[in-house]
Image (cartoon, helix red, strand yellow):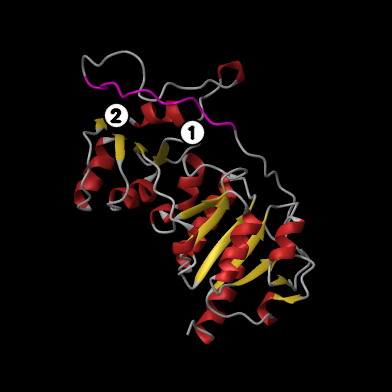
Amino acid sequence: MSDHSSDRPRRAAPRPSSFRSFGPGGGKGGPFPPRRNKGGATPRWEGEDDVALLYGWHTVAEALANPKRRFRKLMATENAMRRLEEEGLKVPVQPQIVKPSEIDKLLGADAVHQGLLAEADHLPFPPLAKAAKHDLVLVLDQITDPHNVGAIVRSACAFGVGAIVTTARHSPVATGVLAKSASGGLEHVPFCRVQNLARALNELKDAGMLVVGLDSEGAADLEDTPMRAPMALVLGAEGKGLRQLTRDTCDVLARIDLPGVIKSLNVSNAAALSLGMARRAIKRNPAP
């Protein structure tokens, strides 16, 4: 299932400070003081544990539409603010109207921010018992690349996943690139963070869930594996796959057989494919 791409966590950026006014007479300093890369290169932002940095139209718009999301600050271009008003989205804080270049300086020229950058609180983490009440849950075993996790969140949202279970350690923070890659999915699929993944899987099993691990050495193709609701689908990190204890705790291990020359998938693509199979199986075998 792996393409052996890098899956190392990224270092968190320093804590952002307060906004300044970007209008005439504005104070000095920046709303998110930039962390310079070596050689004075363009600063990059990922946020840190107690603050979520959200940028891009879908990411910020979905957050604004979520009553559970608490905003601290918002930077927006004139065009972006006009679009928010046209969409009827209420902004709960006083926005700072800026030029696109001001946001470029903070995120880097490659970031597609579409004129929106916000600082917000993280969403609450539901308890595992609440996650177990859904018909489909996704479990991530130390998948740390924020691009991959964000893409997985987007697919999870599309396939109606009730919650994503991750470990408190060895998991990326729901901010920055992850939030952008999720394209608003963070507002609809909550993260449930646990200390011990094997123990959490056993709790899901005790709650009646079928725990299916995706593994290249699984006994059968996932498409041919009996699945039913409620179930938890478990994915491992690229290159490493599922850890041994995770493998041992799953009810069943299944693989994805590919007919083409390339026999492996990026973990986010594998997640989308396996979630589609799981959702079809649940439709045939719904929870009683």
Camera-nearest residue between 91 and 115? 91
Is 121 above or below relative to 248? above
Q: Which residue is mark 2?
A: 98
Q: Quadrant of residue 226?
A: bottom right
Point out the stretch of residues depicted in magenta: 11-23
Q: Secondary structure at mark 2?
A: loop
Badge 1: residue crowd in 10 Å (few <14, some 14–19, many ≥20): some
Q: Is residue 76 visible?
A: no
Q: Are marks 2 and 1 in contact (CB under 8 Å)?
A: no
Q: Is residue 16 magenta?
A: yes
Closer to the camera, 57 or 199?
199
Q: Position of residue 9 (x, y in %)?
A: 63, 39
Residue 141 appears at what percent x and percent y? 65, 54
Q: Tell me what residue is drawn at x 61 percent, y 56 percent.
A: 140
Percent from the top left, x then y, of residue 246?
A: 70, 59
**Which amino acid, mark 1?**
Glu
Q: Which residue is mark 1?
A: 48
Give the side of residue 125 with respect to residue 67, left or right. Answer: right
Q: Is residue 99 left or right of residue 229?
A: left
Residue 287, position as x, y percentages in the image: 49, 81
Q: Which of disc 1 and disc 2 is earlier in sequence?
A: 1
Look at label 2 and name its amino acid: Val
- The count of marks equals 2
Front label number (2 vs 1): 1
User: Which mark is drawn over residue 32?
Assistant: none
Is 25 situated above or below 74? above
Q: Residues within 10 Å of mark 2 (few under 14, many from 20)?
A: some
Q: Residue at x 61, y 45 (%)?
A: 145
Would you say the magenta stretch is mainly helix, strand or loop? loop
Label 2, label 1: how far apart the Cα atoms are:
24 Å
